[in-house]
Amino acid sequence: MKGYLQENLVEGFRKSPFRAPLKAWALVPFYAVISLTVGLNSGLLRFELISAELVFLLPLTLFIFPALLEEAFFRGVLIPRQIIERGRWQVVIAIAWSTLLFVLWHPLNAVTFNSSAMPTFLDPAFLLIVAILGVTCGYGYVVSKSIWVPVLIHWATVVVWVFFLGGRNLVLEL
Protein backbone atom coordinates (compact mmCIF):
# COMPACT_ATOMS: atom_id res chain seq x y z
CA MET A 1 0.00 0.00 0.00
CA LYS A 2 2.84 2.39 0.82
CA GLY A 3 4.32 1.88 -2.66
CA TYR A 4 0.95 2.51 -4.30
CA LEU A 5 0.40 5.74 -2.35
CA GLN A 6 3.97 6.82 -3.07
CA GLU A 7 3.45 6.27 -6.80
CA ASN A 8 0.03 7.89 -6.96
CA LEU A 9 -0.07 10.68 -4.42
CA VAL A 10 3.55 11.69 -3.98
CA GLU A 11 4.42 11.43 -7.67
CA GLY A 12 1.07 12.97 -8.61
CA PHE A 13 1.85 15.96 -6.41
CA ARG A 14 5.35 16.28 -7.89
CA LYS A 15 4.09 16.60 -11.46
CA SER A 16 3.36 20.20 -12.43
CA PRO A 17 -0.05 20.96 -13.94
CA PHE A 18 1.68 23.47 -16.20
CA ARG A 19 3.51 20.63 -17.95
CA ALA A 20 0.30 18.71 -18.51
CA PRO A 21 -0.65 18.12 -22.13
CA LEU A 22 -3.36 20.46 -23.38
CA LYS A 23 -5.73 17.51 -23.81
CA ALA A 24 -5.74 17.06 -20.01
CA TRP A 25 -7.89 20.19 -19.89
CA ALA A 26 -10.03 19.23 -22.91
CA LEU A 27 -13.20 18.35 -21.00
CA VAL A 28 -13.26 21.59 -18.98
CA PRO A 29 -15.19 23.67 -21.56
CA PHE A 30 -17.75 20.87 -22.02
CA TYR A 31 -18.09 20.55 -18.25
CA ALA A 32 -18.59 24.31 -17.90
CA VAL A 33 -21.28 24.48 -20.60
CA ILE A 34 -23.16 21.41 -19.38
CA SER A 35 -23.00 22.35 -15.70
CA LEU A 36 -24.09 25.94 -16.35
CA THR A 37 -26.95 24.73 -18.54
CA VAL A 38 -28.13 22.13 -16.01
CA GLY A 39 -27.58 24.44 -13.04
CA LEU A 40 -29.28 27.52 -14.48
CA ASN A 41 -32.21 25.56 -15.94
CA SER A 42 -32.81 23.72 -12.66
CA GLY A 43 -32.53 26.83 -10.52
CA LEU A 44 -29.57 25.37 -8.66
CA LEU A 45 -27.30 28.10 -10.06
CA ARG A 46 -28.18 31.78 -10.29
CA PHE A 47 -26.02 34.79 -10.95
CA GLU A 48 -25.38 36.19 -7.50
CA LEU A 49 -22.26 37.60 -5.88
CA ILE A 50 -21.20 36.29 -2.50
CA SER A 51 -21.61 38.37 0.61
CA ALA A 52 -19.69 37.00 3.57
CA GLU A 53 -17.58 38.46 6.34
CA LEU A 54 -14.67 36.08 5.82
CA VAL A 55 -14.76 36.12 2.03
CA PHE A 56 -10.99 36.69 1.78
CA LEU A 57 -10.35 33.31 3.46
CA LEU A 58 -12.60 31.36 1.15
CA PRO A 59 -10.29 30.79 -1.83
CA LEU A 60 -7.66 29.17 0.39
CA THR A 61 -10.23 27.25 2.42
CA LEU A 62 -11.96 25.97 -0.74
CA PHE A 63 -8.58 25.01 -2.15
CA ILE A 64 -7.86 22.75 0.82
CA PHE A 65 -11.40 21.40 1.19
CA PRO A 66 -13.01 20.33 -1.00
CA ALA A 67 -10.52 20.58 -3.90
CA LEU A 68 -7.22 19.26 -2.54
CA LEU A 69 -8.49 16.67 -0.07
CA GLU A 70 -11.26 15.29 -2.28
CA GLU A 71 -9.09 15.09 -5.39
CA ALA A 72 -6.22 13.49 -3.48
CA PHE A 73 -8.57 10.68 -2.49
CA PHE A 74 -11.01 10.32 -5.39
CA ARG A 75 -8.38 10.66 -8.12
CA GLY A 76 -4.97 10.29 -6.45
CA VAL A 77 -5.84 7.19 -4.43
CA LEU A 78 -8.65 5.58 -6.42
CA ILE A 79 -7.18 5.94 -9.92
CA PRO A 80 -3.72 4.46 -10.51
CA ARG A 81 -1.47 7.07 -12.14
CA GLN A 82 -0.32 4.60 -14.77
CA ILE A 83 -3.83 3.35 -15.60
CA ILE A 84 -3.60 4.62 -19.17
CA GLU A 85 -0.98 1.96 -19.88
CA ARG A 86 -3.53 -0.76 -19.03
CA GLY A 87 -5.81 0.21 -21.89
CA ARG A 88 -8.90 2.23 -22.64
CA TRP A 89 -11.41 0.00 -20.79
CA GLN A 90 -9.36 0.06 -17.59
CA VAL A 91 -9.28 3.86 -17.83
CA VAL A 92 -13.06 4.03 -18.32
CA ILE A 93 -13.66 1.67 -15.38
CA ALA A 94 -11.28 3.58 -13.08
CA ILE A 95 -12.80 6.97 -13.92
CA ALA A 96 -16.35 5.60 -13.61
CA TRP A 97 -15.59 3.98 -10.24
CA SER A 98 -13.95 7.09 -8.78
CA THR A 99 -16.78 9.25 -10.14
CA LEU A 100 -19.46 7.02 -8.65
CA LEU A 101 -17.81 7.18 -5.22
CA PHE A 102 -17.30 10.94 -5.62
CA VAL A 103 -21.01 11.42 -6.33
CA LEU A 104 -22.05 9.17 -3.43
CA TRP A 105 -19.69 11.03 -1.09
CA HIS A 106 -21.70 14.25 -1.37
CA PRO A 107 -25.01 12.97 0.08
CA LEU A 108 -23.04 10.95 2.65
CA ASN A 109 -21.17 14.12 3.62
CA ALA A 110 -24.47 16.00 4.05
CA VAL A 111 -26.10 13.24 6.10
CA THR A 112 -23.03 12.61 8.26
CA PHE A 113 -21.23 15.93 8.70
CA ASN A 114 -23.18 18.87 7.32
CA SER A 115 -26.96 18.55 7.42
CA SER A 116 -27.39 22.14 6.19
CA ALA A 117 -25.95 20.95 2.86
CA MET A 118 -28.61 18.26 2.47
CA PRO A 119 -30.97 20.18 0.15
CA THR A 120 -28.08 20.94 -2.20
CA PHE A 121 -26.20 17.65 -1.93
CA LEU A 122 -29.34 15.59 -2.56
CA ASP A 123 -30.49 17.71 -5.52
CA PRO A 124 -30.40 15.60 -8.74
CA ALA A 125 -29.10 18.59 -10.75
CA PHE A 126 -26.25 19.04 -8.27
CA LEU A 127 -25.41 15.34 -8.36
CA LEU A 128 -25.38 15.38 -12.18
CA ILE A 129 -22.98 18.35 -12.12
CA VAL A 130 -20.83 16.51 -9.55
CA ALA A 131 -20.77 13.43 -11.80
CA ILE A 132 -19.64 15.45 -14.80
CA LEU A 133 -17.02 17.15 -12.61
CA GLY A 134 -15.82 13.72 -11.48
CA VAL A 135 -15.40 12.53 -15.07
CA THR A 136 -13.65 15.79 -16.03
CA CYS A 137 -11.25 15.59 -13.08
CA GLY A 138 -10.65 11.87 -13.60
CA TYR A 139 -9.84 12.38 -17.26
CA GLY A 140 -7.54 15.31 -16.43
CA TYR A 141 -5.70 13.20 -13.88
CA VAL A 142 -5.33 10.17 -16.16
CA VAL A 143 -4.01 12.23 -19.07
CA SER A 144 -1.72 14.50 -17.04
CA LYS A 145 -0.66 12.11 -14.25
CA SER A 146 -0.67 15.22 -12.05
CA ILE A 147 -3.05 15.52 -9.11
CA TRP A 148 -2.83 19.29 -9.52
CA VAL A 149 -4.88 19.24 -12.73
CA PRO A 150 -8.05 17.90 -11.06
CA VAL A 151 -7.37 19.99 -7.95
CA LEU A 152 -7.31 23.18 -10.03
CA ILE A 153 -10.41 22.17 -12.01
CA HIS A 154 -12.31 21.33 -8.82
CA TRP A 155 -11.11 24.46 -7.01
CA ALA A 156 -12.03 26.79 -9.88
CA THR A 157 -15.46 25.16 -10.08
CA VAL A 158 -16.21 25.65 -6.39
CA VAL A 159 -14.83 29.21 -6.31
CA VAL A 160 -16.97 30.25 -9.30
CA TRP A 161 -20.01 28.52 -7.80
CA VAL A 162 -19.63 30.10 -4.35
CA PHE A 163 -18.49 33.57 -5.45
CA PHE A 164 -20.64 34.15 -8.54
CA LEU A 165 -23.40 31.55 -8.95
CA GLY A 166 -25.23 31.56 -5.64
CA GLY A 167 -23.41 28.56 -4.21
CA ARG A 168 -23.83 28.16 -0.50
CA ASN A 169 -20.79 28.86 1.56
CA LEU A 170 -20.86 25.37 3.06
CA VAL A 171 -17.31 25.59 4.39
CA LEU A 172 -18.05 28.53 6.68
CA GLU A 173 -21.31 26.91 7.80
CA LEU A 174 -19.51 23.97 9.43
Image: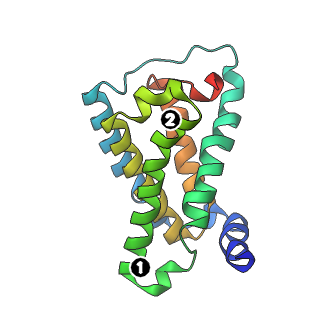
Q: Quadrant of residue 50?
A: top right
Q: Quadrant of residue 60?
A: top right
* Amino acid marked by disc 2: Val
Q: Residue 105: give its label.
A: none
**Residue identified by numbered label 2:** 111
* Amino acid marked by disc 1: Gln
Q: Quick check: 150 left or right of 107?
A: right
Secondary structure type for disc 2: helix
Q: Residue at x 60, y 42 (%)?
A: 66
**Residue identified by numbered label 1:** 90
Q: Earlier in the sequence, mark 2 or mark 1?
A: 1
Give the quadrant of the N terminus: bottom right
| Number of residues whose C-alpha sits closer than 10 Å to that of mark 2, classed few (under 14), some (14–19) or many (20 or more) | some
Residue 64: where, in percent of width, then height?
69, 43
Judge by depth and name the residue closer to the eye, 76 or 113. 113
Residue 86: where, in percent of width, then height?
46, 86
Residue 38: where, in percent of width, then height?
28, 37
Q: Quick check: 59 left or right of 157?
A: right
| Number of residues whose C-alpha sits closer than 10 Å to that of mark 1, classed few (under 14), some (14–19) or many (20 or more) | some
Q: Quick check: 123 left or right of 164?
A: left
